[in-house]
Image (cartoon, grey):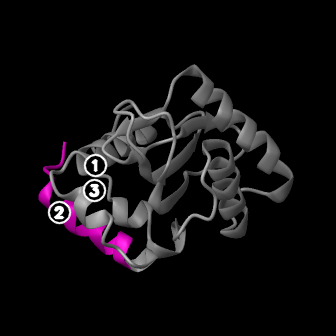
Amino acid sequence: MTTNVTIDLKSVFPADRILFPLQQSSKDQVVQELAEGLVATGQIAQKDMDKFVKEILAREALGTTAIGKGIAIPHIRTDLSSSLIALLGFSKEGIDFNSLDKKPTHAVFMLASPMAQKDQQIRILGRIAAVANHENFLKFLLQCESAQAVADLLEEIEGQVPAP
């Protein structure tokens, strides 16, 4: 059954779920750093971290999740959690995430949802893509100086993007 629940990115990625700035610079290292952030925020258990990283990297091996315009959205459906897992990492310098537009990735929106919640993940992926496609998102993102500034920007830009 599909529901028409509006996805609110500020509730999915509040400031305490934004790593600012990312310390690592390669795709694999950033995935590991974000997974450590998921452990630190209590979203996955320490014992599950290696399996989570392997699942994310296996998904990346199928095709890049770096959609361009400075955005990557590594995502999986997993049995490691019964609720949505989400963390956003920010890099002012940019990361080579094998982006479709060949440009550096600055925002990495990591998502994982339970196997039974496919619709929720698809709606969130759509909202992230809509915000990322806003003409000023990347320009303003690169001006952010804190996790809270990134969260505020997400909220502001999302308010300018029509809901699906």
Residue ID at (43%, 48%): 105
Q: Is residue 70 visible?
A: yes
Against 34, is 97 above or below?
Answer: above
**Does 84 sit left or right of 92 as displayed?**
right
Q: Position of residue 50 (x, y in %)?
A: 81, 45
Q: Main secondary structure of the magenta part?
A: helix
The answer for how far apart the CA atoms under marks 1 and 3 are is 7 Å
Do callouts 2 and 3 mark residues in contact (Cβ within 8 Å)? Answer: no
- Which quadrant does the C terminus fall into? top left
Q: Which residues are magenta?
A: 149-164
Q: Is residue 125 magenta?
A: no
- Which quadrant does the N terminus fall into? top left
Q: Position of residue 80 (x, y in %)?
A: 72, 44
The answer for how far apart the CA atoms under marks 2 and 3 are is 16 Å
Residue ID at (28%, 69%): 153
Residue ID at (79%, 40%): 51
Which residue position holds label 1? 132
Which residue position holds label 2? 159
Mark 3, other Cα within 10 Å: few <14 / some 14–19 / many ≥20: some
Q: Is residue 82 visible?
A: no
Do callouts 1 and 3 mark residues in contact (Cβ within 8 Å)? Answer: yes
Q: Which mark is residue 62?
A: none
Q: Decide which of tag 1 and tag 2 comes sooner along the chain.
A: 1
Q: Position of residue 126 (x, y in %)?
A: 31, 40
Judged by depth in the image, the label closer to the viewer, 2 or 3, is 3
Against 72, is 6 above or below?
Answer: below
Q: Nearer the viewer, residue 72 or 101?
A: 101
